Image (cartoon, rainbow, N blue to C red):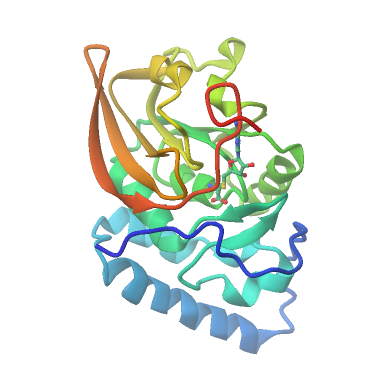
Amino acid sequence: MDSGEFENSIPAGNEQGHYSCESGSDLRSSNRLAKTRQRMLKRDLEGRDITDPRVLKVMAEIPREEFIPESWQSQAYADGPLPIGMGQTISQPYIVALMTQELRVNRDCEVLEIGTGSGYQTAVLSKLVKKVYTVERFAQLSESAQAVLGRLGVSNVEFYVGDGSCGWPKRRLPTSRCFDRIMITAAVPKIPEPLAKQLADGGLIVAPVGYGGVQELLACEKKANKIIERLICDVRFVKLLGEYGFEG
Ligand code: SAH
C-alpha cells in the first residue's frame, strides 16, 4: 500500500488562509483544475485502494481548491498536503479518502471530527452522514472552514472551537449522548479517554496514533467498553495539542 502522509513536507510560502470565489474569468485554470481532479480520482484514489463508490463520488464533487489559500490553489489536486495557515495543513487527498473509507459511515451516522482545519474532510463527511460535529483549536481556521462550507451550502455541520482531545462539550451533545463514529485528523499519543467515552458501542474511531514523526493509522472499534485496534498503515500527521494530546 502506498502509505504515508507527509504533513510536514510542505513548501514554504504564503500560509495565510485567504480564500477566493471562482472569478469566472479564468476558464483555463478551472479547466486545468478539473483535469487534475480527474487525475487525482483515477491515479491517486482508484489507482490505490479507494474502492468505496460513495467516497469517490463525493471527492469528485467537492471543490478542494475552495479550502486552500489562493496562492496554492493550482496545487489543489496534487498528491500531498498543503499549508492552510497557523502552521497547519490540509491532508493529502488519498489520506482523506482512506480515512473516510475506513470510517465505514452511513446516512444515519453522527460523526465527531477532531481537527476541522480547512474543513475539507468535514465537507467530505457531511455528504455521507446525518451530521458532523467538528472541533478546531484555532478560531481562525474554524471560521474559514465555516465560511467555505456555508458557501458550498453544507448545513449539517456543527462547529466548536476548543480542545478536541477533551471531546465534544457535554452541554451540546446530540440526543443519543454519543457518536457513531469519531475521526481524529491530527496525531495523538494514544486514543484520548474522553473520545473513547463519547463513542457509541459498536462505533469506530479512525486516528493516527504514535509518538514519533511517523504514526500508525488505526481503526478502533468499541465493543462492550473495550477498544479493539486494527492497523491500517503508517502515516505522518501534525500533532493534536491538548490535555489528552501532545503538550503544546
Ligand atoms: N482535516 C483537516 C486537516 C487537519 S490538520 C483538513 O481537512 O483540512 C489538524 C488540525 O487539528 C489542525 O487544524 C489543528 O489546528 C487541529 N488541532 C490540533 N490540536 C487540536 C485540538 N486539541 N483540538 C482541536 N483541533 C486541534
Q: Quadrant of the C terminus?
A: top right
188 or 162: nearer the viewer: 188
Q: Residue at x 22, y 12 (%)?
A: 224
Taking depth in this image into account, of 210 and 38 the one nearest to the observer is 210
Where 162 sits versus 81, above or below? above
Question: Left of 229 or right of it: where is 35?
Answer: right
Q: Say if 113 sits above or below 195 in the image.
A: below
Relative to residue 193, is residue 217 drawn left or right? left
Residue 183: quarter of image: top left
Q: Residue at x 47, y 16 (%)?
A: 194
Residue occupying the far bottom of the picture:
28
Q: Quadrant of residue 45?
A: bottom left
Q: Estimate the x, y position of residue 199 in percent, counting from the top left.
A: 38, 20
Q: Is residue 235 left or right of residue 140?
A: left
**Quarter of the picture holding the N terminus:** bottom left
> Where does residue 46 sit, x and y in percent of width and height?
28, 68
* Picture residue at 49% right of the left edge, 49% below the top: 237
Above or below, 244 against 6 in this view is above
Q: Position of residue 71 (x, y in %)?
A: 72, 72
Question: Residue 159: percent from the left, percent from the top?
Answer: 63, 32
